[in-house]
Amino acid sequence: MSNIPQIGQPAPDFSTPDQNDNPVSLSNFNGQWIVLYFYPKDDTPGCTTEAKDFTELYQNFSELGAKILGVSPDSGKSHCKFISKHNLSITLLSDPEHILTEAYGGWRLKKFMGKEYMGVVRSTFLISPDRIIAYTWPNVKTKSHALTVLTKLQYLAGT
């Protein structure tokens, strides 16, 4: 299991494709807050709720200079369908080899119906404009999560 980056540590750098197959790196967002959230699968109930909630609050995050990046093992094609179906305004990153997810400690042992397997654990990282981990949510429950992240960002950004 990878270590989960802690508050105050530099955010692990990354370069991975977005839904349109454009490379996205941490360095693309110098001087911006980043909400980097990991989720298991496009178009499943919890993941859809989370994506729609972040989309609903997109303007609030944007006003604070924050970019929202969702990460899952799904393909760009799957992400495009997911975005289109639910009219999402967030950027989704493809991480089929779990490289980015592992760097942030989100690829972990999970248990379901008595079976153990490796998978994406829903988690979120708030990264400051100077690329430092400002806050972490290592085991996310989707209900009200986007609002919780926005509230923490408002506090940390001093608004």
Image (spheres, grey):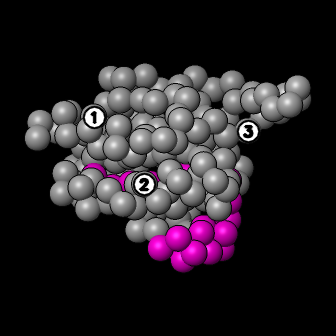
From mark 1 to mark 3, how far is it between C-alphas?
A: 27 Å
* Quadrant of the rendered image containing residue 135: top left
CB contact under 8 Å: marks 2 and 3: no
Which of the two residues, 156 or 52, is positioned nearer the viewer here? 52
Quadrant the N terminus occupies: top right
The residue sitting at the left extreme is 159
Q: Residues within 10 Å of mark 2 (few under 14, many from 20)?
A: some
Secondary element under disc 3, as helix, strand or loop, is: strand
Which numbered circle lies on residue 152? Answer: 1
Q: Which residue is mark 2?
A: 53
The residue sitting at the front extreme is 143
Question: Seen in the image, is 64 located left or right of residue 76?
Answer: left
Foreground: disc 2 or disc 3: 2
Q: Which residues are magenta?
A: 66-87
Q: Assess whether residue 53 is covered by the magenta stretch.
A: no
Mark closest to the chain's N terminus, 1 or 3: 3
Q: Is residue 15 visible?
A: no
Secondary element under disc 2, as helix, strand or loop, is: helix
Residue 7: where, in percent of width, then height?
A: 36, 23
Quadrant the C terminus occupies: top left
Foreground: disc 1 or disc 3: 1
Which of the two residues, 25 or 40, is positioned nearer the viewer here? 40
Residue 119: where, in percent of width, then height?
A: 73, 38
Q: Assess whether residue 85 is covered by the magenta stretch.
A: yes
Three-letter code, disc 2: Asp
Q: Which residue is mark 3?
A: 119
